[in-house]
Image: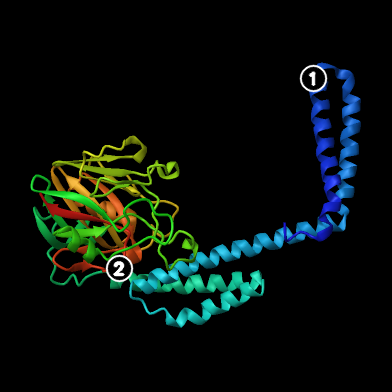
Amino acid sequence: MKFLPNNFKKIAPIAAAVVLIGLSVAGAVFVKLVADKKVAKTNKRLVETSAELDVFKSRDEYLINQSLEASISAVKTTFDATVKAYETYLDLTDSGIDTKKLAPNLAKILSYLADVNYASASAEIKLFNASLADLKPKAGSLAVPDTANLPQSNTPPGAGYSRQVVSTAIGPYTVSLVAADLNSAKVIIDTASDGDCRDNCPVLSLADYVGRSGAFAGVNGSYFCPASYPSCVGKTNSFDTLLMNKNKVYFNSDNNVYSTVPAVIFSGNSARFVGQSLEWGRDTGVDAVIANYPLLLSGGSITFTGGDDPKQGSKGGRSFVGVNGSTVYIGVVHNATVAEAAYALKALGLTHALNLDDGGSTALYSGGYKAGPGRNLPNAVLLVNR
């Protein structure tokens, strides 16, 4: 309300009158259905209402507010675009790309926004996004290990760590992964927080999670809101999806907004993948539960071929957890879109696989970092001996 003129209250009665007239019109239309003789009266009222609306719209207060609402909408749209571009900028920086040359462009955008010059800011954002797009391939190439001496194989390791080039119908992809037999190992989820956390949540490095849980391998967990993102103010390092940690504590059980997100449940020597986490109860007798999106493979078939999220469609390290029978795999498909990661995992013979967080959070640990270390994380997927 602080954006409205002080004399806005003067037009409130007029607005109320218009609403009342509208209700009268609706009532008249209903009566028309009962008695045709009301038609003439209804038409007359419509004409009168139209005339009164024209008078209302011609008032200075109305025109001022219409103009102000349009300006606020334009500024908000430009601001949202700036935040999105800046977060892409941060992801590229976190991936090791030198983004310093773009800092002046970013400063110029922020200056335009401060002056409420959304037209110039919008034009500058387009140039900024074009420069970011030029840097993305470089980020992808940095994330790819040297493939010169890597084995080319579509057979995943039976146990332990491997980095190999996998051939698919859409091209070769480098995959780093750790395999473990669920008869002798189990999956657990470790969290930095002891329970639900909505803001300023604790985080740890993947190496810290591995060390304190006595794990022999680990990978980054579910999507979360990094503290460096402007859009994460008020919810830093929080995550929204279902999870049960190693202490049998369920997180985000009441978050129905994300109850349609896929999940995997590990219990004994098997894993169950569900298309929606709402399909799973709150059984604490299992070893681990983690929800994230999208589901990459189900029953040996690719279940994700692309979406509307540009981040999922850009090249980068794609973390995953998957299975084939009683063998579990955690790892990273390098320099791939999320859809391309699904092709690589299918070529490796995995039957089920779930996408995990990626970008600046990508990390894989097995006797040391094989990818990452990436950002500190609110949760991680770990492999421990039984």
> Is disc 1 placed on a helix, strand or loop?
helix
Q: Position of residue 196 (x, y in %)?
A: 37, 51
**To which residue does mark 1 refer?**
33
Q: Position of residue 275 (x, y in %)?
A: 33, 40
**To which residue does mark 2 refer?**
374
Dot 1: few (<14), some (14–19), or many (≥20) neighbours within 10 Å? few
Amino acid on which disc 1 is placed: Leu
Amino acid on which disc 2 is placed: Gly
Q: Quadrant of residue 206?
A: bottom left
* Identity of the residue drawn at 13% across and 66% down: 367
Q: Nearer the viewer, residue 150 or 316?
A: 316
- State which tag comes first along the sequence, 2 or 1: 1
Tell whether label 1 touches label 2 (CB within 8 Å): no
* Above/below status of 115 relative to 152: below
* Identity of the residue drawn at 16% across and 68% down: 368
In the picture, the quarter occupied by the N terminus is bottom right
* Identity of the residue drawn at 21% across and 66% down: 207
